[in-house]
């Protein structure tokens, strides 16, 4: 009678996160790693011009976040990123997959990444 629409089921582990063009990683050995986000919408450009606000947002990342962003720049899928975290950090990265999923969720909510299916 009534048919439910079948949504496409996607597997997070096979998806590849990609940084948007306005987002980049800045590495500094002394101060750490920062995620640089360009402020590009109309209201932000207005505040930059007339209120002398900074043109970029700088978000300090911990060692895990900086490592994940480096892996994203290499176009790896989520499963490969979690395996690389475990190999690089060992027990300190546990629980790696839930931690990685939450970090990627935050990046997605902020609209700083897009997804590509493999």
Image (cartoon, helix red, strand yellow):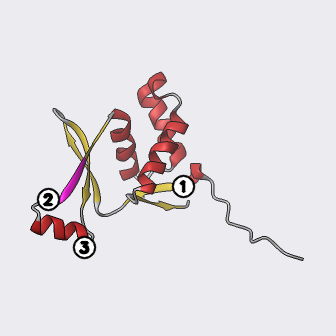
Q: Give residue 117's position: percent from left, percent from top.
A: 55, 61
**Marking on residue 53:** 2
Question: For the residue carrying disc 2, how many other residues have a C-alpha within 10 Å: few (<14), some (14-19), or many (20+)?
Answer: some
Residue 6 position (above or below residue 72): below
Q: CA distance from mark 3 to mark 1?
A: 32 Å
Which residue position holds label 1?
Answer: 15
Residue projecting furthest to the bottom:
1
Residue 34 part of the magenta-drawn span = no
Q: Residue at x 18, y 35 (%)?
A: 31
Q: Quadrant of the C terminus?
A: bottom right
Q: CA distance from mark 1 to mark 2?
A: 36 Å
Q: Residue at x 82, y 73 (%)?
A: 3
Q: Give residue 22's position: percent from left, percent from top.
A: 28, 62
Residue 56 part of the magenta-drawn span = yes
Relative horizontal placement of residue 63, taking residue 88 as reference (left or right): left
Q: Compare marks 1 and 2 and give the one earlier in the sequence.
A: 1
Residue 28 position (above or below residue 48): above
Which residue position holds label 3?
Answer: 42
Foreground residue among 56 and 46: 46
* Magenta region, residue range: 53-58
Q: Compare marks 3 and 1 and give the one earlier in the sequence.
A: 1
């Amino acid at each position: 009678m009534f048919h439910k629409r079948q949504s496409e089921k996607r597997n997070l582990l096979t998806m590849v996160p990609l940084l948007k063009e306005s987002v980049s990683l800045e590495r500094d050995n002394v101060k750490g790693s920062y995620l640089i986000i360009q402020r590009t919408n109309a209201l932000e450009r207005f505040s930059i011009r007339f209120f002398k606000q900074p043109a970029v947002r700088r978000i300090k990342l911990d060692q895990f976040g900086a490592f994940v962003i480096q892996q994203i720049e290499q176009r790896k899928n989520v499963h490969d990123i979690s395996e690389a975290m475990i190999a690089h950090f060992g027990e300190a990265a546990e629980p790696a997959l839930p931690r990685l999923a939450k970090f990627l969720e935050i990046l997605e909510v902020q609209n700083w990444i897009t997804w590509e299916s493999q």
